[in-house]
Image: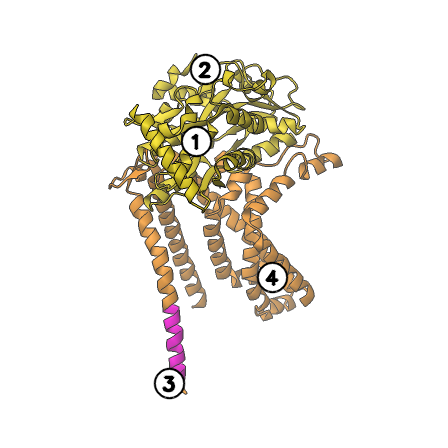
Amino acid sequence: MIRSVRALAFAATSLTFASTTTVAETLTISAWGGFFEETLAAEIYPGFTAETGIEVKSIAQPEDSAWMTQLMAAARAKQAPADLSLVTDEVLIRGNEAGLWAKLNPANMAGTEALKDGYVILDDGGMAYGVGALAFYTTFVTNTDFAPDAPASWADLWEDKWDNKLGIITTPNSGLMEATAKTFFGGYEIMETREGLEQVIAKIAELKPQVSLWYRDEGQFQQSLEAGELNAGLYYHDVAMLSIWDGKPIASTFPKEGGVVADAYWVTPRDSKNISAVEKFLDYVSRPEVQASMARTMGVFPVVPRESMDLTDEEFSAVGSDIEPIRVQTHIHLREGDWLESKYQEMIAQ
Amino acid sequence: MSTASRADTATAYALGLGTLLTLGVFFVVPLIFMVIVSFYKPDPMAFYKEAFVWDNYKTFFSSFYYTVSLRSLWSSLLGAVLVVVIAFPAVLVIVDLSRRWQLFWVILLLSLMCLSEVIVGFSWLILLSESAGLPRLFGALGIWENPRSLSPSFGAMMVGMVTIGFSIVALILFPQAARRDRSLEEAAMTLGTPPWRVFFTVLLPTFRTTLLSVTLTMFVYLLGVFVMPTMLGRPKDWTMTVIISDKALGDANLPLGAALAVVMLIVTTVILLLSMLTTRGATGRSTR
């Protein structure tokens, strides 16, 4: 009751504020550079500006940990490089632990109620510091000129038919560890102990003779796969679909153990001065129709229930799958952080 | 007259000292900061906690980082020697050309220097690729039956390193090679020494100190190269630079990154000091 009255009062004041001010508000939003940032700027932000009159300045952010390092440094200088930022759950949790995120009022973002349960991340005081933005799959991608049949299982990666032409993401949180655990060790339980993690890493080490590229840059992988320099590997489903629509000889397969799903969240750096505009944006971007539009234009998996959107079966199967997905065990990656990263890097580089 | 020139020297000195002081401050302060951070305690959940621990240095002596740093020293040294071995004879040829052709080569070398590491790396990536580069050409010519991509490999990384180092070394050696005193070579030739022996017995000894110092410069330069190992090398060719940036930026573990950088700095300084001492001894003897 009190909450809604306050929301009403807030809405009233922000309305009067909006009508009296002549200076257009600007919201700086950052997303992973390249396709994500470009498509959001071209397809999603204009609708928000049209509805609220708030201009959006879209900027590109680097890969997660590098971006987190920059956000940390900015926070020390009491700066906010962006008002909103698209981050993975790992950055969301680490950033919260370091006190990087601003607190948002869920009452001002009624639209977020459309999200699936658990996608509005609340602190103990009931304030939100993260709001689900989208989910994305990592799948088993192949070059169909060299591998005409879609792989059935993640275990196919270990077969010796790839002619030393696999490309694998170089970081341990790519989902390969979880896929390996689920495929060969009956589930994620093995990852609870260090001995278990070492067994999983040893299994991945068996891939080494076949892997010609351990990549950190998506671009290099995609170009090599399209050119046939690589025959298969781990890659993001959304960008793979773009290649396919472009007529490239590529297939993105959800193996029977499932594709790897990861969630991305919107967060606001603590020193942002535009909290009310941020809340308006999150209210907008959480709506089922905006989520459906993101699925269509970006190939990402929505974070609202399927039945709330008007996606056709075909559109839905282009962005995801009904197979129970593999989930990156973020809590393990955070707990074992440095130890795990070093073990993994040693396995690759030794 | 003499007071005026003394005043000039004083001005030059003041300017020079100012520059050195600025450089010193802006080099030393970040360096001190790096050393301080290397003793902080990394915090996997956040960033780091201010503390004084030796853990980051202990990590270095785990076998992995130890191996990687030896590997970096080896690949930079090999790269430096290769660059100098290739560039020195090339420069000797260039300085004997007509002025017009000398100019052509100098401009070419300068343009090569303008290219960023990424562009050079990418060109080699294409040139060494199976679908578009040399392997395909060899395949078409029938020289190579089952052409394969030549990168990533240690060789590809070396080729990349040599490419970016070549123009620098050639331009450093150029003025000295052009202005060298040719009377010794001519004397040897007149006395019937074959040209290849003149190269080894006259030219190389005269240029020994220069070549050594250029090799050392190249060695330090190549130690800091980042793009070539990641783009053209395999994971087992990755140098310390790659690992440091992986740690500091990729894993947001600045303390460990800083500690690794400090160790590399110490190792490099020791190597440089040692080689400077040995070369000074050598030149001292030869002049005596």
Give the Cα distance between marks 3 and 1: 74 Å
Circle nearer the viewer, 3 or 1? 1
Callout 4: chain: B
Disc 1 packing (10 Å; few <14; some 14–19; many ≥20)? many
Instruction: Assess whether mark 4 and mark 3 are in contact (beta carbons under 8 angstroms).
Output: no
Q: How many marks?
A: 4
Residue that badge 2 annotates = A182
Instruction: Assess whether mark 1 and mark 3 are in contact (beta carbons under 8 angstroms).
Output: no
Residue that badge 4 annotates = B198
* One can see residue B259 in this view: yes
Could you tell me what secondary structure mostly forms the magenta stretch?
A: helix
Q: Earlier in the sequence, mark 2 or mark 1?
A: 2
Q: Earlier in the sequence, mark 3 or mark 4?
A: 3
Amino acid type, label 4: Val
Circle nearer the viewer, 3 or 2? 2
Residue drawn at x 50%, y 18% is A308
